[in-house]
Amino acid sequence: GEDVEQSLFLSVREGDSSVINCTYTDSSSTYLYWYKQEPGAGLQLLTYIFSNMDMKQDQRLTVLLNKKDKHLSLRIADTQTGDSAIYFCAENPTLGGGADGLTFGKGTHLIIQP
Amino acid sequence: GAVVSQHPSWVICKSGTSVKIECRSLDFQATTMFWYRQFPKQSLMLMATSNEGSKATYEQGVEKDKFLINHASLTLSTLTVTSAHPEDSSFYICSALTSTGLWAFFGQGTRLTVV
């Protein structure tokens, strides 16, 4: 079945860039997503990338997709204390959309050092 | 953007009682909604897929008689945890799928504590 892997923890200093990595196995993924979960809250869709794109930038966020290696990354520039959260990588395994649930990674806990 | 409202945000109940959690899509119609469970420091586990007007599809290992799902309208799905036990204590999150099937928006989550 589909599998999405992420590192469990990442620690960065405030002001530095954070890079959260994700690998996935399903080559038919149409969209790949990054979600943010703050403590005790639900998930918030941060950004997404379509599988025919290599890069997408949205303010401080940059998503890079290497489809050949099935590797997705999220770069957060100028990391702030408010960025402290768990970041989930997710893929939509159904080509062309569908009613299947997304497949999530276990989440990367981003820890900001002052 | 699309909003999904989940209620309540937290609930404490006694063992043996039932708890109902609501998931509403506020500004779009959701034919399909999903219910997830999250254990501490773990990822989301899909429990079931809820389709409007039909029976929910449960993932392997999830007891359908214990976790009752009702998707009575295009904007509301409910999850009822029946005869709750302390091991059911967890964070439950719903998500609603847009009509294109590509976007899933999440509720705020419900922290259930069974004492």
Image: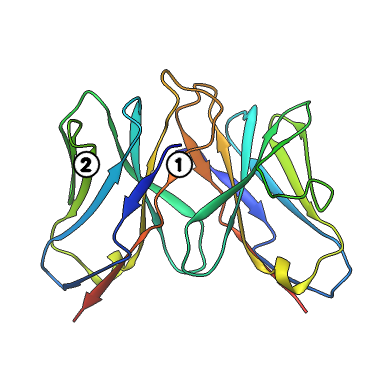
The quadrant of the picture occupied by the C terminus of chain A is bottom left
In the image, farthest residue toward the left: A16
Task: Quote the CA–CA distance across marks 2 and 1.
Answer: 15 Å
Is residue B82 left or right of A41 when viewed as pictured? right
- Which label number is shown at residue A71? 2
- Element at badge 1? strand
Query: Which chain letter goes with mark 2?
Result: A
Q: How many residues crowd around disc 1 within 10 Å: few (fewer than 14), some, or many (20 or more)?
A: many
Coordinates of residue A64 in the picture (x, y in percent)? 17, 40
Q: Residue at x 74, y 35 (%)?
A: B56
Above or below, B69 relative to A40: above
Q: Which of B93 and B8 is in front in this view?
A: B93
Q: Where is residue A24 in the image (x, y as percent from the top left)?
A: 31, 41
In the figure, A47 relative to B112: above or below?
A: above
Mark identifier at residue A103 = 1
Q: Which amino acid does label 1 sit on?
A: Thr
Find the residue positioned furthest to the top.
A96
For the residues labelled 2 and 1, say whether their Cβ atoms are less than 8 Å apart. Answer: no
- On the rendered structure, is A3 left or right of B108? left
Residue type of the residue flagged with mark 2 = His
Q: Where is residue A27 in the image (x, y as percent from the top left)?
A: 31, 28
Q: Which residue is drawn at 84% across and 48% down?
A: B65
